[in-house]
Image (cartoon, rainbow, N blue to C red):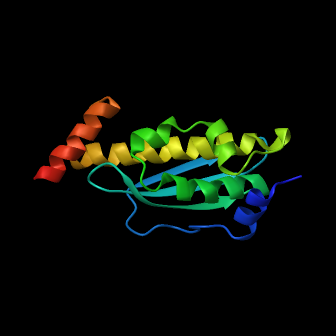
Amino acid sequence: MYNEIVIDHFNNPRNVGELKGCNGIGTSKSKEYGDVVKLFLKVNTNVVIEEASFKTVGNVATIAISSALTEKLVGLTVDKATKLTAADLCELVGGLPEGKKYSAIIVKEAVDDAVKNYRKRLMKGAGLHKTILKPELITKIANMKKKK
């Protein structure tokens, strides 16, 4: 049913657990199946993800995608991370059976939530937590803080 990549990430998950010093945390839950994904990101001042980890309760596919995703995210900007699609996440593990593709959607939602949380923390740190800003402006704010 599952390919070797999925089985490997399920049996030997990478980057499991809470990430100390993270500045972005995202959660997603499948109401239908009960899977829960919690994703932790450590984003540097260049708005690049330096580390990622996860805690997942769910099926083989959800755990495998969460594990593979943490490896993929390192080195990506937060903007690029949000552009990953559920199909991209399925490809990370070499594909999934049709009935398990919902797992990629749950993990994608956790990515988006973690980036949203990171941006919210960044704006709050800049004193702009009540202002609505486009992601491009948030990146500029991060770069301004870096130059100080």
In the picture provided, is 94 more to the left or to the right than 121?
A: right
**Is residue 92 positioned above or below 85 on the image?**
below
Could you tell me residue 123's position as x and y percent?
27, 42
> In front here: 76 or 126?
76
Picture residue at 76% right of the left edge, 40% below the top: 101
Q: Position of residue 129 (x, y in %)?
A: 28, 40
Q: Is residue 146 visible?
A: yes
Horizontally, residue 135 falls left or right of residue 27, namely left
Find residue 60 and report its image quarter. bottom right
Report the residue at 32% width, 48% height from top.
Answer: 47
Total numbered badges shown on the rendered structure = 0
Residue nearest the observer in this picture, 71 or 123: 71
Q: Is 7 left, or right, of 93 in this rendering? A: right
Q: Residue furthest left?
A: 148
Q: Residue at x 69, y 44 (%)?
A: 90
Residue occupying the far right of the picture: 1
For the point 42% across and 46% down, the residue is: 117
Residue 128 visible in this rendered orientation of the protein? no
Q: Residue 105 in the image: x percent, y percent?
A: 66, 39
83 in relation to 41, above or below? above
Residue 20 drawn at (x, y percent): 42, 69
Question: Closest to the observer: 91 or 132?
Answer: 91
The quarter of the displayed image where residue 141 is located: top left
